[in-house]
Image (cartoon, rainbow, N blue to C red):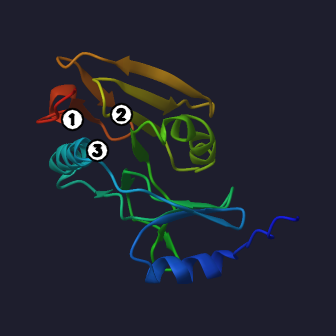
Amino acid sequence: MSALPKKFYSPQEYLELERAAEYKSQYYAGEIFAMSGGSPRHNLISTNVIGELRTQLKGRPCGVYPSDQRLKIPATGLYTYPDVSVVCGEAQFDDEDLLLNPVLLVEILSDSTEAFDRGKKFEHYRKIPTLREFLLIAQDRCKIDQHVKQEDGRWVLLSEVSDMQSSIKLPSLNCELAVAEIYYEVKFE
């Protein structure tokens, strides 16, 4: 007995399906991968990060985008939805709604996404020429990892924060996020 052949989609086919879909999917190398919805903790953390960034960046030429903003990485062909994206300067889009030039990306980790977010997804993100910082935020405990691109192009883990009294300085945006504000109203089990 032979397996059914796998269907591969062009980027155009993916976008046509995605724009009409009631749910979000990632696309890479001809395959479409369904994305699950966020937990209440995930949504609180995302809202808190977006709110804090918007407040601190208000009046500056930066925009904060939630997880509904699709990102395209031309160098690798990944189409995905980061939990939070920040662009400084004019946002650049391909095909009207595919963000190309984030400065900061944030992923809120879950058991099902953590390995991918820390590994392969971060490999894709590092190919974005404008990206300067990447935050990985745990939702089951107080833990935030901050990766920063150096002048020579190397990425380093700048900080690992696990203290509610701490804050994270974001050099790419010249602002600071209090950990207690990121986890405001979030209950750990």
Give the x, y percent position of residue 83: 37, 51
Residue that numbered label 2 is attached to: 137
Q: Quadrant of residue 187?
A: top left
Q: Which residue is mark 3?
A: 42
Amino acid carrying label 2: it is Ile
Residue at coordinates 28% horizontally, 44% vertically from top-left? 42
Residue at the right extreme, as displayed: 1
Q: Can you give x and y, in whole percent of width and height, for residue 150 in the image?
A: 55, 29
Asked if the residue at tag 2 contacts the one at tag 1, i.e. Cβ–Cβ closer than 8 Å, the answer is: yes
Q: Nearest to the eye among marks 3 and 2: give it.
A: 3
For marks 1 and 2, give the CA distance: 9 Å
Mark 2, secondary structure of its residue: strand
Query: Residue 97 placed where, x, y %?
Result: 45, 75
Q: Position of residue 90 (x, y in %)?
A: 39, 65
Give neighbour class at mark 2: few <14, some 14-19, many 20+ (Cα, 10 Å): many
Q: CA distance from mark 3 to mark 2?
A: 9 Å
**Which amino acid is tagged 3?**
His
Three-letter code for the amino acid on which mark 1 is drawn: Ile
Earlier in the chain: of badge 3 and badge 2, it is: 3
Q: CA distance from mark 1 to mark 3?
A: 11 Å
Nearest to the observer: residue 104 or residue 30? 30
Crowding around mark 1 (Cα neighbors within 10 Å: few <14, some 14 to 19, many 20+) is: many
* Callout 3 secondary element: helix
The residue lying at 35 percent from left, 58 percent from top is 67
Q: In the picture, which quadrant includes the N terminus? A: bottom right
Tell me if 86 is positioned left or right of 111 in this view. Answer: left
Q: Secondary structure at mark 1?
A: helix
Q: What residue occupies the far front of the structure in this picture?
A: 1
Residue 182's label in the rendered image is 1
